[in-house]
Image (tube, rainbow, N blue to C red):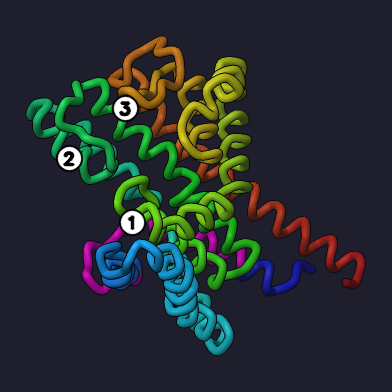
Amino acid sequence: MVPPGIVLTAFVLCAALLVDRLTGDPHSPYHPVALLGRFIGWWGNPSSYSQGWQRIAGILFWFLTILLFAVPFILFSALAPWYAYVVIAPFLLKSCFAWRSLEEHTLAVVSALKDGVETGREKVQVLVSRDTAALDREHILSAGYESMTENITDSIISPLSFFLVFGLFGAAVYRAANTMDAMLGYRDERERIGWCPARMDDIFNFIPARITVFLLLMYFAIKGRVGPAWRTMRRDGYRRPGFNGGIVMAAMAGGVGIRFEKPGVYTIGDGERTLDEGGPEIIRAARAVSLMFAIVACCALFLLGSLINSTGI
């Protein structure tokens, strides 16, 4: 018999994914991540500190933000009766990841381009930090699909991995850490105060990014494109700054046969076809990876449960 706790974990994971697909992200100022963002915005203004104190403030507030965001999840997990946990936990976990909204934001960029390049530039500016004023159609699509590809790890695989290992507490810690990096981890006036959030995000995503690459390679193996995906990942995976996002983007670019490019910074992939042609395949690959992760995770949980039961641990 599989331990009840493992069954419950598998149920919450699958239920949270279903809730996400059905509801997406509610646009509410009271959403937990929206509240988190406002708190980070309050303390994350570099002009509030002297240069000498910015890095220290970033470290101290990183820990404080993690604590404040995670405590409600810890208390709920510890105090809620099992029947309340079954009902509420999927919604709490869903607040820590975003699957459907990734597609919606990317498709919004594609749709905006129907009204012209200027409209596309305005829409993609919501997703990326780069200057979009001079981007042409292909580079606008690249920015949108790059954001989606990188966020397969940041917004889906990582928070769900932390949930599997550490429960709701782990998912909450990851979501807080990743949100701080998304708001502060840039090489501009925020570089000092965002140093700790950026480094911790790199650490947290190290293993999940490689899980994402593995799942992408499995998907492209089914599609008969594992060779180009692997070669592009090996060749271009570290052209982008950082050691996590680039390998995912390179595996996707090689498998789909498109090129990601941030002008003057990096080029990933060979561009066998345009992003207008390959974009739908990127969305299908992201969906497949998310479902593959859920299936593998549930199988691993039940295998672990059977092992525990058979050994009497």
User: Label 2 neighbourhood size at 10 Å, few (<14), some (14-19), many (20+)?
Assistant: many
- From the viewer's perspective, is 104 left or right of 72? left
Tag 3 residue? 142
The kind of secondary structure element at disc 1 is helix
Of 313 and 204, the residue lying toward us: 204
Looking at the image, tell me whether mark 3 or mark 1 is earlier in sequence order. Answer: 3
* Image quadrant containing the N terminus: bottom right
Whole-percent x, y for residue 257 in the image? 45, 16
Q: Indicate which label's residue lies in the foreground, 2 or 1.
A: 1
Tag 1 residue? 183
Of 88 and 114, the residue lying toward us: 114
The kind of secondary structure element at disc 2 is helix
* Image quadrant containing the C terminus: bottom right
Whole-percent x, y for residue 222 in the image? 59, 24
Query: Where are the magenta residues, as a range?
Result: 9-32
Structural distance between the alpha carbons of marks 3 and 2: 13 Å
Looking at the image, tell me whether mark 3 or mark 2 is earlier in sequence order. Answer: 2
Would residue 31 be seen by someone viewing this image from the given angle? no
Name, please, the residue furthest toward the top.
272
The structure residue drawn at horizontal position 56% and vertical position 43%, both measured from the top left corner, is 209
User: Label 1 neighbourhood size at 10 Å, few (<14), some (14-19), many (20+)?
Assistant: some
